[in-house]
């Protein structure tokens, strides 16, 4: 079946640098995408979402980019901080009322 | 704090047993979703309830069942437990429309089947 996937399982960045986490999706009918952050021992925490009629959306220190042509989603974190260390999941709404999650990328921030 | 409450936080039981996981959604949310998170499967959608009615079903085993009560809290029942059922079980809730919106997740129940 179609699924959401991630290119890099682990990303290590220096504190203060920008981070880019990538996600590929395969269902061109998906119309809603979300990024979640999951810290150890906690549930996933909503970061930012984007609908398919947009190609960019900005939040506080985060930007999500959507490229429908190549079915690619990315999360950019500016000035990465130690508190950003977590696993990041992208998710897509591709079957009515169901979110399909990618496998996750672990972000490690080096001080 | 997401506002979604899950109990218990940890559950240790034996194969063949039955357990019940409980979830209280955020105030005002009508939808409750259940997800299973294991190391080799990631986050898997199990089932959604909206205002007491089943709305969507994912990869939920026949040994598992759920319900949502009039006060909107939900329970996930897992029976005839197997070793492979060991996982983190998350509940999430979303707003009044019943459509996919940003989900707010609880802290999860860690189930260990020995």
Image: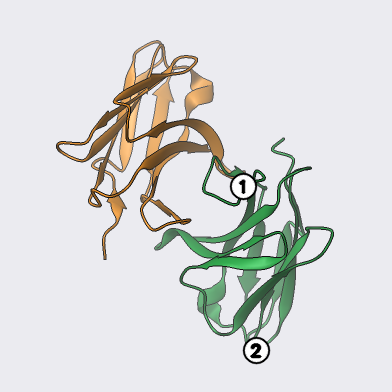
Tell me the distance, in whole angstroms, between the alpha carbons under discs 1 and 2.
38 Å
Instruction: Tell me if residue A67 can be seen.
Output: yes
Chain identifier for the orange-coloured part of the image = A
Give x and y (percent) for residue A72: 23, 37
Left or right? Give the position of A12 relative to A84.
Answer: left
Residue toward you, A89 or A108: A89
The quarter in which the C terminus of chain A is drawn is top left
- Residue B16 is marked as 2
- Residue B97 is marked as 1
Left or right? Give the position of B62 relative to B13.
Answer: left
Instruction: Tell me if residue A39 can be seen.
Output: no
Mark 1 is surrounded, within 10 Å at the Cα level, by few (under 14), some (14 to 19) or many (20 or more) other residues, namely few
**Vertical side of B84 occupied by A47: above or below:** above
The quarter in which the N terminus of chain A is drawn is bottom left
Left or right? Give the position of A41 relative to A57.
Answer: right
**Vertical side of B1 occupied by B77: above or below:** below
Give x and y (percent) for residue B9: 73, 56
Q: Nearer the viewer, mark 1 or mark 2?
A: 1
Residue toward you, A86 or A91: A91
Chain identifier for the green-coloured part of the image = B
Judging from the image, mark 2 belongs to the subunit labelled: B
- Disc 1 on helix, strand or loop? loop
**Residue located 40% across and 10% down the image:** A16
């Amino acid at each position: 079946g179609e699924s959401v996937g991630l290119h890099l399982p682990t990303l290590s960045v220096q504190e203060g640098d920008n981070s880019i986490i990538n996600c590929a999706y395969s269902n061109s009918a998906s119309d809603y995408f979300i990024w979640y952050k999951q810290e150890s021992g906690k549930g996933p925490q909503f970061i930012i979402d984007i609908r398919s009629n947009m190609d960019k959306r900005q939040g506080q220190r985060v930007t999500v980019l959507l490229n429908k042509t190549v079915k690619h989603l990315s999360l950019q974190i500016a000035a990465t901080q130690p508190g950003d260390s977590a696993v990041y999941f992208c998710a897509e709404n591709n079957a009515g009322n169901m979110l399909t999650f990618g496998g996750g990328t672990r972000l490690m921030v080096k001080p | 704090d997401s506002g979604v409450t899950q109990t218990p936080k940890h559950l240790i039981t034996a194969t063949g047993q039955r357990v019940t996981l409980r979830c209280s959604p955020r105030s005002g949310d009508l939808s409750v979703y259940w997800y299973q998170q294991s190391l080799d499967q990631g986050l898997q959608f199990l089932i959604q309830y909206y205002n007491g009615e089943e709305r969507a079903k994912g990869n939920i085993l026949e040994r598992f069942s759920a319900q949502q009560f009039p006060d909107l809290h939900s329970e996930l029942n897992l029976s005839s437990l197997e070793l492979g059922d060991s996982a983190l079980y998350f509940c999430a809730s979303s707003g009044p429309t019943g459509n996919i919106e940003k989900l707010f997740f609880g802290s999860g129940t860690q189930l260990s089947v020995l």
